[in-house]
Amino acid sequence: MQPLPHILEPGDSLATWLADQGQPAWRARSIHRWLFGRRASSFADMTDLPADLRGRLEADYRIWTTSIARHHRAEDGTEKLLLELHDGQRIECVLLRDQDRRTVCISSQVGCAMGCVFCASGIDGVVRNLSTGEILEQLLRLARLLPPDERISHIVVMGMGEPLANLDRLLPALAEAQHPDGLGISQRRITVSTVGLPAGIDRLAAENPGYHLAVSLHAADDALRTRLVPVNRAIGLADVMASADRYWESSGRRLTFEYVLLGGVNDSPEQARSLVRLLGGRAALLNVIPYNAVAGLPWREPTPAAREAFLDAVRTGGVNVQVRRRKGARIDAACGQLRRLDAQARTV
Ligand code: SF4
């Protein structure tokens, strides 16, 4: 038997269904308002819908296609969910608390095809794209971790997967997240993170240039970048930077470049100076992320001295740099770690 459709899948199926029930089309927005704004857990909670309509929704649609396989909380307020999908696959999503910010980090795919050698998400490749409903369900789940007087303020699509490889499903989800009847999160508070797929960046620039774009570099020369981010072999840094520049021209928004600092690999002052040359005076922010050791992978954290020397060199070169704090490090909040540990635990 086919599973019931997800209520948040886009398209005209809900509109058609409502019309078939003799209901006005605006009921669809009422349902979304209940789910995002009022955090209803079931159709029965949607008390301003006619009772018989609630019953028919219950029979024909699902709100929840995931279950919470694990829920970890760190002392700094970070919470991480491992969600089991309808087909048994597992993905991660995270809520980060930072002063008055409530940022959620969501996944776009099961696994990842980009193969970044230091990342637990990509070790086993990509399994499949997430549907729009599955992307939105992460937001529903994370919003429900907050007390009623708090709201999600920022979204980063930086969890498992390469977002630009699943734009067809991601863009409708991000559009829904902005809807004033839903989460009402402005486009400027949504970050899409990519390893730098030029075709995807160009499509985003053409369709939705208002998002904040974060491009993961991790190296300033092609040889090292191809070693760390294998997909770079087919692209090359010159094309990554050119497409980032085109996005900047379309959006007028400052770009962010991400750089995971790996001990003894890409953390020397010479490499910092190469990075300064690559960034070449762009209006950009460099986000340096000291590596979080992943069990079973050979990479190590940079020493504090190496980290400071690297940061000094990029600052001296005039680059606007920030170091991303490792919130939630003790709950394996780095991308893909919880899923991988869980999978390992289930095989022993
Ligand atoms: S770091 Fe991101 S792009 Fe690279 S393998 Fe992991 S999930 Fe994919």
Image (spheres, grey):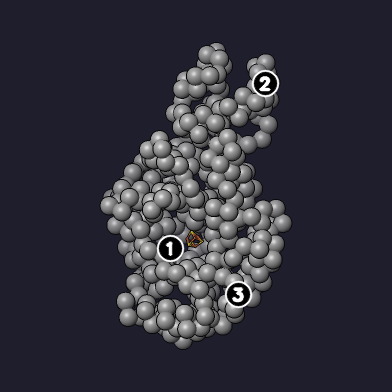
Could you tell whether 192 is left or right of 300 in the image? right
Frontmost residue, 267 versus 145: 145
The percent position of residue 279, horizontal first and vertical second, equals 57, 77
Answer with mark 3 or mark 2, whichever residue precedes in sequence.
Answer: 2
The percent position of residue 274, horizontal first and vertical second, equals 52, 83
**Residue that carries the numbered disc 2 in the rendered image:** 24
Mark-to-mark CA distance, 3 and 2: 50 Å
Mark-to-mark CA distance, 1 and 3: 27 Å
| Tag 1 and tag 2, C-beta contact below 8 Å | no
Answer with mark 1 or mark 2, whichever residue precedes in sequence.
Answer: 2
- Label 1 packing within 10 angstroms: few (<14), some (14-19), many (20+): many
Answer with mark 1 or mark 3, whichever residue precedes in sequence.
Answer: 1
Kind of residue indicated by mark 1? Cys
Element on which disc 1 rests: loop
Kind of residue indicated by mark 3? Arg
Element on which disc 2 rests: loop
| Residue at the image point whose x is 66% and y is 63% from the top | 252
Mark-to-mark CA distance, 1 and 2: 47 Å
| Residue at the image point whose x is 60% and y is 80% from the top | 280
Q: Quadrant of residue 14?
A: top right
Q: Is residue 188 above or below residue 46?
A: below
**Residue that carries the numbered disc 1 in the rendered image:** 119
**Residue that carries the numbered disc 3 in the rendered image:** 282
| Residue at the image point whose x is 32% and y is 47% from the top | 72
The percent position of residue 239, horizontal first and vertical second, equals 65, 72
Residue 59 seen in the current view: no
Circle 1 or circle 3, nearest the eye: 3
Element on which disc 3 rests: loop
Frontmost residue, 281 versus 307: 281
Q: Is the CB of mark 2 within 8 Å of ligand 1?
A: no
